[in-house]
Amino acid sequence: LGIDRDSAKSFSYACLPITTKVLTPDGWKFHYELRENDIIYSYNLDENIIQKDRIVLKHKFKNKDVYRFFNDEYSFECTMDHRWYGYKTYYRNDTEQKEYCYFTAAEFGTEDFTIVLGSPIEEPDDYIDGKTKDILNSLELQKDTIKVSSLDYELLAENKDVFCLTTNNGSFI
């Protein structure tokens, strides 16, 4: 096609509803409040930490189906091809193994996937401003992972506006 991998990813509509907020050092913001080069928080896969990152590109698409995934503890919304980071569990010689990878919401029922939610924050406490520290503390995740095989799902809305952000780390919170 003559385009690079990152640009090609934007054609899959792997997105979140336009009403989803993104965590920034100034608090939670909507898609329309963000600009390219703005600082947000993202998950660094190589270092397994949450850190500040820049928005490289903003993508917005119309008329995409949005699904709600839920159980007794969690609920989230995304398109079926939204990429999640986590691991799949398998056994080799009676020993549990974890293979870390990206997978889509459409794959949730196909293997034993677990989404990674929490991780340490990169900056020491005295570097994070009070407002951001309060936001991060308010997340209060009950677990740092969600086993997606325990989730039900339903079509929440058809033909909705969705968005995705490209960051240096390839993820955002």
Image: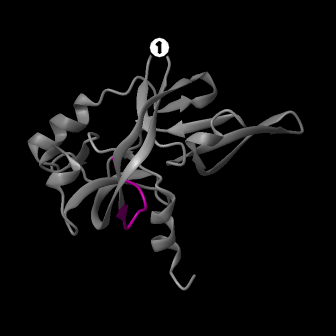
How many numbered tags mark residues here? 1
Choose top left, top right, bottom left or bottom right for residue 17.
top left
Q: Chief secondary structure of the magenta span?
A: loop
Q: Which residue is mark 1?
A: 72
Residue 135, image x and y in percent? 19, 36
Q: Secondary structure at mark 1?
A: loop
Apparent side of residue 114 relative to residue 51 in the rendered image (left or right): right
The image quadrant where one finds the N terminus is bottom right
Foreground: 145 or 161? 161
Farthest-out residue, right: 93
The magenta stretch spans which residues?
Answer: 166-173
Foreground: 142 or 106? 106
Foreground: 2 or 117? 2
Residue shown at the point (37%, 68%) measured from the top left: 168
Q: Amino acid at mark 1?
A: Asp
Name the colour scheme: one colour
Residue 41, image x and y in percent? 28, 52
Apparent side of residue 65 relative to residue 138 in the rendered image (left or right): right
